[in-house]
């Protein structure tokens, strides 16, 4: 007998020495509140097709979504297909995205991935992880964002925001993005897994920020194991 085919999305194996700090019931409460506040979270990157989504996410590395949207508004008005992008050429792509970080290398990647899409995929974006990650400038995180946003796979892309929030909420303690991704997939109930990436990234971007987390407005503060204990009022001394 030949070997059986591996599952398309293997079930992650959780570190047997680790389990979430939050209990299953608290994890459910956590995601119930995220869902109540924003039932259908989406990326803040502007896109109109799988192709423009791939390009926008690839450009967003070490850049804010706001800065990427400003650049892609100009870029996509001239080229929103692989064929149009190749016709645009490297110099013009570079000039149109020069306001975002690492723009020269990103321009080369956008041009190269567009050519590959034309040559190998009939000008269409392949909606599977292996083919996506084979494109220049598309790593695991970028592929995860694309597959999640398009509803192809309940992927959890771990960026700096997701990494920070996962640790603060006690949903993960991994030392690398890959480890945190595995732990999140094991900890988050299936019904919320498809949307979890967006909730965590938006929570980290606007509430659970890096330097001074806004615990006073956090909708899950009472569930958070990292929330500072309230200060006790100092006793006044009599004269």
Image (cartoon, helix red, strand yellow):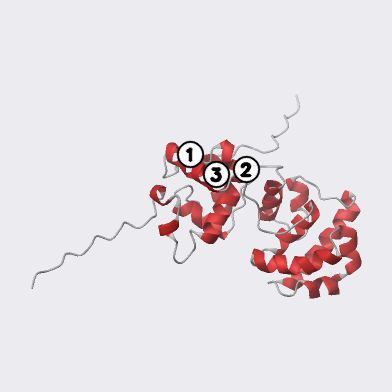
Frontmost of labels 2 and 3 is: 3
Mark 1 burial class by Cα count in 10 Å: few <14, some 14-19, many 20+ = some
As displayed, is residue 40 above or below residue 99?
above
Q: CA distance from mark 3 to mark 1?
A: 10 Å
- Per the model, the C-alpha gap separating discs 2 and 3 is 12 Å
Instruction: Tell me, yes or no, if residue 176 can be seen here.
Output: no
Q: Is residue 170 visible to the viewer in this orientation of the structure?
A: yes
Q: Taking 224 as reference, is 2 above or below it?
A: above
Q: Which residue is mark 1?
A: 28
Location of residue 165 in the rendering, given as x and y in whole percent from the top left corner: 50, 54
Q: Residue at x 48, y 39 (%)?
A: 28
Task: Please say if 218 is above or below 62.
Answer: above
Q: Which residue is situated farthest in the left direction here?
A: 239
Q: Nearer the viewer, residue 164 or 73?
A: 73
Image x and y of residue 99, in percent: 71, 74
Q: Taking 47 as reference, is 80 left or right?
A: right
Name the secondary structure under disc 3.
Answer: helix
Q: Residues within 10 Å of mark 3 (few under 14, many from 20)?
A: some
Quick one: 6 or 156, which is closer to the camera? 156
Q: Residues within 10 Å of mark 2 (few under 14, many from 20)?
A: many
Label 3, on which residue? 35
* Residue under the image location 54 percent in, 37 percent down: 189
Picture quadrant of residue 231: bottom left
Quadrant (top left, top right, bottom left, bottom right) of the N terminus: top right
How far across and how far down the image is residue 100, in percent?
A: 70, 72
The residue singled out by tag 2 in the image is: 194
């Amino acid at each position: 007998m030949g070997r059986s085919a591996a599952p398309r999305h293997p079930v992650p194996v959780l570190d047997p020495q680790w389990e979430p700090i939050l209990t299953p019931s608290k994890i459910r409460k956590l995601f119930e509140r995220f869902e109540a506040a924003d039932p259908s979270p989406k990326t803040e990157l502007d896109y109109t097709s799988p192709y423009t989504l791939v390009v926008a996410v690839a450009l967003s590395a070490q850049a804010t979504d706001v800065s990427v949207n400003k650049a892609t508004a100009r870029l996509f008005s001239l080229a929103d297909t692989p064929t149009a992008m190749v016709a645009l050429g490297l110099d013009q792509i570079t000039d149109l995205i020069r306001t975002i970080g690492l723009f020269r290398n990103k321009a080369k990647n956008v041009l190269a991935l567009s050519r590959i899409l034309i040559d190998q995929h009939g000008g269409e974006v392949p909606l599977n992880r292996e083919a996506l990650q084979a494109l220049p400038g598309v790593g695991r995180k970028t592929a995860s964002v694309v597959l999640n946003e398009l509803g192809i796979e309940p992927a959890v892309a771990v960026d700096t925001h997701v990494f920070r929030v996962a640790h603060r909420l006690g949903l993960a303690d991994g030392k690398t993005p890959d480890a945190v991704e595995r732990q999140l997939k094991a900890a988050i109930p299936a019904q919320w897994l498809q949307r979890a990436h967006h909730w965590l990234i938006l929570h980290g971007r606007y509430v659970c920020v890096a330097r001074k987390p806004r615990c006073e407005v956090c909708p899950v503060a009472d569930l958070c194991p990292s929330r500072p204990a309230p200060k006790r009022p100092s006793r006044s001394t009599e004269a």
